[in-house]
Image (cartoon, grey):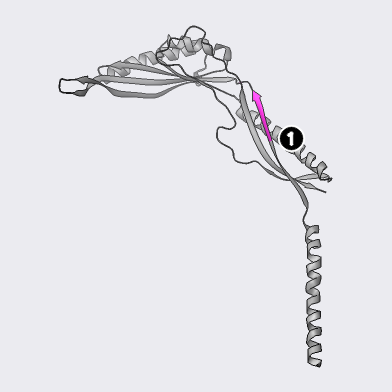
Amino acid sequence: MRRRSLFALLLVCAAAPIAAAKTNTPNAEAKDIPTQIETRGSATITLVPDIATVTMAVVSRSEKAPAALDLNSADAVRLIAFCRSFGINQTDIRSGPVRVIPRFRTVNDGRGMVQQDDGYEATNTIRVKLTDMSKVGVFVRSALDNGASRLNGVEFALKDKDNATEKARAAAFADARRKAQHFAGLANVRLGRVMRVSYPPRLPDAARFSDTVSLDEGAEPRINVPIEAGTIEVRADVDVTWSAK
């Protein structure tokens, strides 16, 4: 009988600390966990582009490869000279790649359709940057009269992309703070210091928007081609974690 009483007493003594631990642990853990508010700020700013890149091609054909290349080089020299006379800086003019490829034509030789040699075609791509948006249309039309065989496109962009991105990030951070203050008010707590800032990875072209205007090879543009630069949207997102009391 004494053995049973002693065993029961030991069980009670052993269970008492466990029960106390179960009762006290949640309160201790709750005190150790700080209150935090995490928000994602987003912002999009709209800017007027201040640079335009015009891509053109000089295309020449001849029966012999050297002749095609010589014709192409002469037209490319004329086009580059025109670009300089238009006021474009030498550093804003880039040529190449230069290609010379054989051409073929399909004919009926009486026994069926076959391909025959049709000489060679030489191509040189010329890219220029303009900073006066009002002259882009005039330049495009005039380039076709001064050696350019084809207009591949016009792309608008921002000269200072980093500054534009920084402005978008600052606006995104301000948006995150505004949201955090709103949630702090709803939770009846006071917003504290910033504990973490996370700038998530973004797509390569998320910080700029380009608009391309293309003309078919057979098109007949007129003087002062109506090209409007429009606007460029720069977006940024940021995650911010704040302490709260």
Q: Is residue 149 above or below residue 27?
A: above
104 in relation to 167, above or below:
above
84 and 214: which is toward the camera:
214
Residue 132 spot, x, y in % from top left: 58, 14
Residue 86 visible, this angle: no
Judged by its main secondary structure, the magenta piece is: strand
Tag 1 residue: 174
Q: Position of residue 125 (x, y in %)?
A: 41, 21
Whether residue 25 sits left or right of residue 229 in the image: it is: right
Dot 1 crowding, Cα within 10 Å, few <14, some 14–19, many 20+: some
Q: Tell me: 143 left or right of 69.
A: right
| Residue furthest front in the image | 1
Say if 127 sits above or below 3 in the image: above
Specify whether residue 46 is painted magenta.
Answer: yes
Relative to 164, 82 lies left or right: left
Left or right, 148 with reference to 1 = left
Q: Label 1 sits on what residue type?
A: Ala
Q: Nearer the viewer, residue 75 or 206?
A: 206
What residue lies at 56% left-to-right and 36% top-to-bottom? Answer: 203
Q: Which residues are magenta?
A: 42-48
Occupied quadrant, residue 2: bottom right
Element on which disc 1 rests: helix
Choose top left, top right, bottom left or bottom right for residue 26.
bottom right
Residue 105 point in image, percent of width and height = 25, 20
Q: Residue furthest top?
A: 223
Residue 202 appears in the figure: yes
Does the magenta run of residues contain 29? no
- Seen at 36% across and 13% down, the residue is 74
Q: Extreme left residue here?
A: 111
Residue 160 horizontal/vertical position (percent): 61, 26
Tell me the quarter of the image containing the N terminus.
bottom right
